[in-house]
Image: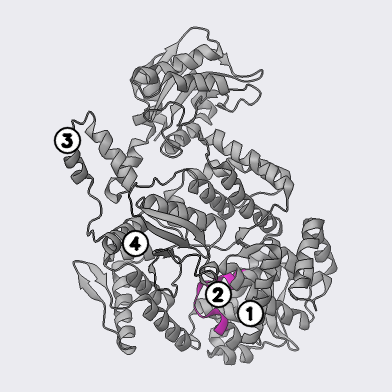
Amino acid sequence: MKDETLDMLAEIVRSPGIGLGSLQKKLVLDTGKSETILKKINVLLEEHGYPPIVRKNKRLWVSLDLEELEQLEHSVETEQLYALSRKTRLILMTLIIFTQKYTSLNVLANQLHVSKNTIVNDLALIKEQLVKEDIQVGYSRKTGYYFLGKEIAIRIMLIRQLHLLIDGKAQEKLLVTYTTIELTEIYQEKEKLLKLERLLHTQFSNRQLKLLCLLIPLLRVRCLNYQEISTGEYRAIIQIIAASDYQRITQAMAGANLCNEASKKEKAFLVIQLLSANVIKSRGEKMPQLGEVIDAVIERFERRSVIFFEDRKRLKQMLYQHLGPAIYRIKYGIPYEDHDIEPIIKEYQAVFPMAKQALRPLENYYQIQFTEIETVYVGLIFQSFLTKGYLMEQQQRVRAIVVCENGVSVSNLLYQTLGQCFPMIDFVCNISAREFYENPLVYEDIEVVFSTIYLRTTKKIFVVSPLLTQEDRQRLIRMVNKELYNREQGISVEDILNLVKKEVRLPDEEKLRSRLNEYFNLPKKQEQLVLDSKFHRLLPEERIKVSKRQFSFNEAIQCVAEPLLKSRFIEQAFVDKIIEKYDERFPYFVIAPGVAIPHAGFNDGVNELGFSLLKLDYPVRFSNKLSAKVLLMIAPVDNYLHQTAVQAFYNCMLKEEYRQELFGLQTATEIKQFFLKNIQ
């Protein structure tokens, strides 16, 4: 039985009444495949004494709670130790070759309980996969199969395999069953790593802790087989590590009795692993220069995306905790823990190009280039600060905490997302599972826990995905409303509107409906929110102006603001703030040659989201070196709703041929047609 059977069962247990279509979409399954898996689940439930899945109106229920699910998974894991999927078998074969002195065809076939032909086919696939990592699988009569290549490359390949192993089930049991590693070794390394955390005033993510607990014993076996890193590789590591970091980590390792027997070369390799490790929390800045560069990254993001971060200090702390390890990962090519993030990338796609642009100062300073996956996780940190949940005033508010076992980028995004989904709940803090178990009295008055893993607790618990898609949020909102507030369908905006209309006359019912849907984050109206933020809706033809006059900077700002002032989208204070705050030494309004986006903050006199545009024949001066012929003024109502439209405008203006065409247009109608043609 494959892991997908347990994965589907877990989704049904965690989301009672989940629709079959939603389940297929979430697990990327077609109808035939999902029906096959559902049959397997019923067989599994029957074998272990549980009732089958109940179907009603294409929705699914199962009479299993979270604790019973955990027990069932444990039983299945034990049964599967000797019935391996090919993916798991390939991982274990790699680990066996990595750690054992002699690995012939017979040895591999016997250990993995498959035929020699199966091993031959598996080896062919492993060889094919390793070509891109510049590693070969060699063979000799004396040692059997072995890896041929640079030792560092072989170890990084091993780390990738361990990440895949952690994604599956019973990783510790598999390692103990199919290698010479003992379970006690893994537990001993965990105790040492927990002590190391305390000495370093940090906390690794749960996944990172698991990885290190498995990696360290494997490396020890590797060294006993005389496969240490070379002197040249050691020197390359030392050049990467800052002297202060090396001293700090090695002192903590000595204090935790971690790898004291290892050579200085092996300790250096482990230092790199610890410096690049994903953390949940870390106290104190160890890289002062990084803090300065992060300031530049934040400023660049603000200018590029036309926003102002209110909680800038906390954002800087989050970025610092994530970027410190990321720099070492990128420099040394160490793989980052991965998630099924494709749905999240699609949902927040507007933020990632802005994150990529913002990271340029950091890339230049450290002479690195952020990979796509590393950029995505930085983008998620920025995303978590773009919108704020608003608290509903009520006398008795449910108090909740969020328990997340992932890194700082994912855990902070989850915390902010849940706050936006449930404005009626008072989210107190975001912690790890270890903190939850170690401090029960601190959270005694907490009523509800939202957690990425199952926890043993008497409190009401909702197990959630670390990365919530829009569909996940919709399902969770229904579940929480039903279980906490006894509401089957959640909050009805139409009922609220009908009550309000009985008491007062509504000047703009559609606008209030939109704001209420935004506030309560209701699923059916989410598409309308996105549509309302599109460029063409925000810049109608009547707010486009063309002028042949010569303007000063102040005059141009006042002129482009007139359509927004006239329609009461902004107050004069907004215009005054732009003029007052603008410093031509830092001409960040100019986003492309001849194009500028003047703006202020959403608290500086904005009544409604909207754009206005001024096209000039004579460019207006923004600094000694920069001027603009096109000014797009943005009136933002928050840090989020205008992002898609700004990104579309920016992408258009990056193309020189588009800019030149726009500069030559002479009427508002021509300009509107230009944007309709060139901006989707």
Q: Which residue is mark 4?
A: 25
Residue 212 lies in quadrant: bottom right
Quarter of the image that includes the C terminus: top left
Mark 4–mark 2 CB contact (< 8 Å): no
Q: Tag 1, which secondary structure?
A: helix
Q: Which residue is nearer to you in this view: 416 or 89?
A: 416
- Image disc number at residue 95: 1
For the residues labelled 4 and 3, the Cα–Cα distance comes to 44 Å
For the residues labelled 2 and 1, the Cα–Cα distance comes to 10 Å
Q: Tag 2, which secondary structure?
A: helix
Going from N to C along the chain, the mark reached first, 3 or 1, is 1
Residue 317 percent across, percent down from the top left: 61, 49
Marks 3 and 1: which is nearer the front? Answer: 3
Please report the residue visible at 24 percent of the width from the left and 61 percent of the height from the top: 486
Residue 670 appears anywhere in the view:
no
Please report the residue visible at 77 percent of the width from the left and 58 percent of the height from the top: 245
- Image disc number at residue 503: 3
